[in-house]
Image (cartoon, rainbow, N blue to C red):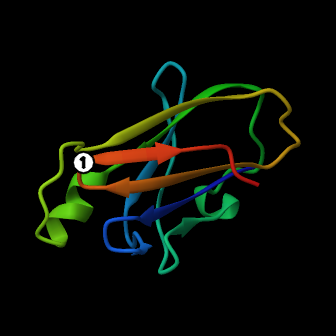
Amino acid sequence: MISTHILDTHLGQPAVNVEIKLLTESGELLATAFTNTDGRVLAQDFGLEKIKAGNYALEFMTQPYFAAKQLATFFPKVVIHFSITQAQQHYHIPLLISPFAYSTYRGS
């Protein structure tokens, strides 16, 4: 299972309605979801029954989010590449964003 959330550290609030794409290592689109009012995309929001071990990417479309807030951003999107080694585990990949910086880590 894969889940994520986005916190806008500039505004100190969850980033709502951000499009997130889940891709294979080769760039094949597996799923698309939008963050909810808490800035989250839950595992079931991606609509995948199971995920295999392998390399993947989450692509966060940050420019439309910042544009809606009338803020310029240096990063039009953020792409996080990650490896799943044990498909039965839950992989939570949070993103902290501001218009000119971002950070990520493996969550729980």
Residue 71 spot, x, y in % from top left:
14, 64
Q: Is residue 54 above or below residue 76?
A: above
The residue at which mark 1 appears reads as 100
Count of numbered labels shown in the rendering: 1
The image quadrant that residue 18 belongs to is bottom left
Q: Relative to 48, is 58 on the left or the right?
A: left
Name which residue lies at 83% across and 36% down.
Answer: 87
Q: Residue furthest top?
A: 26
Position of residue 70 in the picture relative to residue 43 (left or right): left
Q: Secondary structure at mark 1?
A: loop
Is 53 on the left or on the right of 60, as rendered?
right
Three-letter code, disc 1: Phe
The residue closer to the viewer here, 70 or 45, is 70
Q: Which residue occupies the foreground of this view, 27 or 59?
A: 59
Q: Position of residue 27 (x, y in %)?
A: 45, 25
The percent coordinates of residue 10 (x first, y second) are 31, 66
Q: Residue lying at the far bottom in this picture: please name it.
A: 37
The correct choice, above or below, for 21 with respect to 56 in the image is below
Rendered-image quadrant of the C terminus: bottom right
